[in-house]
Image (tube, rainbow, N blue to C red):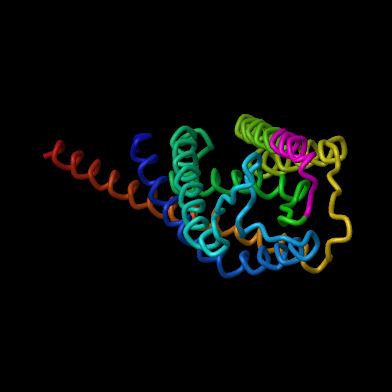
Amino acid sequence: MSPRAFLVRGLLAGLLAGVATFLVAYSVGEPQVGAAIALEEGGDGHSHSHAAEGAEGGEEAAEVSRTNQSTWGLLTGTLAVGVALGGIVGLVAAATLGRLGRLTPGQSTALVTLIGFVAVALVPFLKYPATPPAVGSGDTIGVRTAVYFAFQALSVVAAVAVTYAAVRLRGRFGTYLAVVGAIAAYLVVMVVAGQLFTTVNEVGDFPADTLWFFRRASLITLATMWGVLGVALTGLVIRLYAAERAVAERKALAASL
């Protein structure tokens, strides 16, 4: 059960998650992106998929077509994110192995993935949900990006801290109270942080139904990435653990003869 074994399996699970995420994003998310772009183009009178004029010479520079963005570009992005995320989760699962109470390697890996989804993806999304291309001012994109990552970093730190506290307090208060206390502490921290962090409201007169469908599709895509990653990595770790135990048992049997 070496870190390298977890890393390799994390990369493989991330690759599978990337493929699944592409299929979901293409079928569920891209229609919403297309609808948002159509609204944006209708509002400003020009298309982002057409050629753009050069800043100095007035020459046209061909941009990536919308078709390539929604197919090969999307596939490349989901695969890259999936593999990178899988490697990180695999290494974290290896680092926490044996440090989360009496959980088996498979259970520990599943818990790490669940905590990761909540802390890295779900809670930050609830505070700063995804916005379609036609929403948001270009002048504030730097500020919006900074506050999002700051909120996400706080969420991860809080999740790590309460998990560590739950493990330490488990022996004194029992598993149930330790886990409930950890969840409550995390919620308190993030609710207070959600009130203190700045609110981003640049929706304007963008249609509410289109915005809702886009954000719902974005959340489904995030859940697909983390869900497939968690299931695949947990399954691979369970198989690895079973193989390691079988080898250990054969060695013990041979030594006893």
With 197 as the anchor, is 173 left or right in this view? left
Q: Is residue 218 above or below residue 3?
A: below
The percent coordinates of residue 127 (x first, y second) are 78, 46
Quadrant into which the N terminus falls: top left
Q: Can see residue 231?
A: no
Residue at the (80%, 46%) spot, across then down: 137
Q: Nearer the viewer, residue 252 or 218?
A: 218
Looking at the rendering, the stretch of residues picked out in magenta corresponds to 135-150
Residue at the (55%, 53%) spot, across then down: 62
Query: Is residue 149 inside the magenta stretch?
Result: yes
Quadrant into which the C terminus falls: top left
> In the picture, residue 35 is in which quadrant?
bottom right
Q: Nearer the viewer, residue 61 or 103?
A: 61
Q: Is residue 113 above or below residue 35?
A: above
Q: Can see residue 81?
A: yes
The percent coordinates of residue 198 (x first, y second) are 85, 38
Q: Is residue 106 above or below residue 162?
A: below
